[in-house]
């Protein structure tokens, strides 16, 4: 399976990163070794000193497809959950400043923590999805699906022009504003539509 992540999908986050609001989805990928299941400890990597959390809605593809039209995209997923796109911000900035791909800042081991609870999308109004990330008990990110620049259906349509989506593939749909650093000892907890979804401790 593959993990596809969307960047800059919330205007307020693009602004806090001093990045332009994109006109088509920006995506990058993480390997399957990036996944970290809920409750497992995350160990602060030795190659960064500015590790950031990015809390994101995650959709799981349930059927293979290529060149999927947006109006049919909803047939290709039925479950969603919450995850974190961990980012080594210092490495990312260095790569960006050199005009290089910033994969090393995103694709490292355990950089994609994810809840093991999935919610059925047919029971959720896609325009009424809200989520929250707390760091040591304080709310640091609050996101709402209506603030996404590109909907999951538009994202699927775009990505599937370039590659086949397969059952089990995960799409991290971008993060709202409020990204920030984590340190050893911090606890990250996420909730989706009021339901507790994950708890990760940084060690
Ligand atoms: Mg992200």
Image (tube, grey):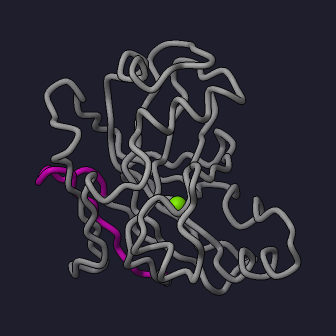
Q: Is residue 192 magenta?
A: yes
**Count of numbered marks:** 0
For image coordinates 71% across by 67% down, the residue present is: 105
Answer left or right for 111 relative to 78: right
Q: Which residues are magenta?
A: 184-198
Name the one closer to the observer, 16 or 89: 16
Q: Is residue 18 above or below residue 37?
A: below
For image coordinates 41% across by 52% down, the residue present is: 83
Question: Measured from the top left, where is residue 141 in percent x and y?
Answer: 30, 73
Q: Is residue 173 magenta?
A: no
Main secondary structure of the magenta stretch: strand
Question: Measured from the top left, where is residue 3 in percent x and y?
Answer: 60, 40
Name the one closer to the observer, 191 or 24: 24
For image coordinates 30% across by 59% down, the residue present is: 147
- Where does the N terminus fall, quadrant-wise? top right
For image coordinates 24% across by 29% down, the residue present is: 121
Answer left or right for 4 relative to 13: right
Q: Is residue 32 above or below residue 89?
A: above
Residue placed farthest to the front in the image? 23
Question: Measured from the top left, where is residue 119 in percent x and y?
Answer: 23, 33
Q: Is residue 89 above or below residue 190?
A: below
């Amino acid at each position: 399976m593959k993990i596809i992540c969307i960047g800059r999908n919330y205007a307020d986050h693009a602004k806090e990163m001093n990045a332009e609001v994109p006109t088509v989805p920006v995506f990058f990928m993480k390997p399957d070794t990036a996944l970290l299941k809920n409750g497992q400890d995350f160990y602060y990597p030795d190659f960064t000193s500015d590790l950031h959390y990015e809390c994101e809605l995650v959709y799981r593809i349930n059927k293979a497809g290529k060149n999927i039209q947006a109006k049919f995209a909803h047939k290709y997923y039925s479950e969603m959950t919450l995850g974190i796109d961990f980012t080594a911000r210092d490495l990312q900035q260095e790569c960006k400043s050199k005009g290089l791909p910033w994969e090393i800042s995103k694709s490292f081991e355990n950089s994609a923590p994810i809840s093991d609870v999935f919610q059925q999308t047919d029971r959720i109004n896609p325009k009424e999805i809200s989520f929250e990330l707390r760091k040591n008990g304080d709310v640091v990110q609050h996101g709402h699906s209506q603030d996404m620049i590109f909907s999951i259906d538009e994202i699927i349509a775009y990505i599937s022009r370039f590659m086949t989506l397969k059952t089990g593939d995960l799409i991290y749909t971008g993060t709202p504003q409020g990204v920030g650093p984590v340190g050893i000892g911090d606890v990250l907890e996420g909730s989706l539509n009021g339901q507790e979804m994950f708890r990760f401790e940084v060690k």
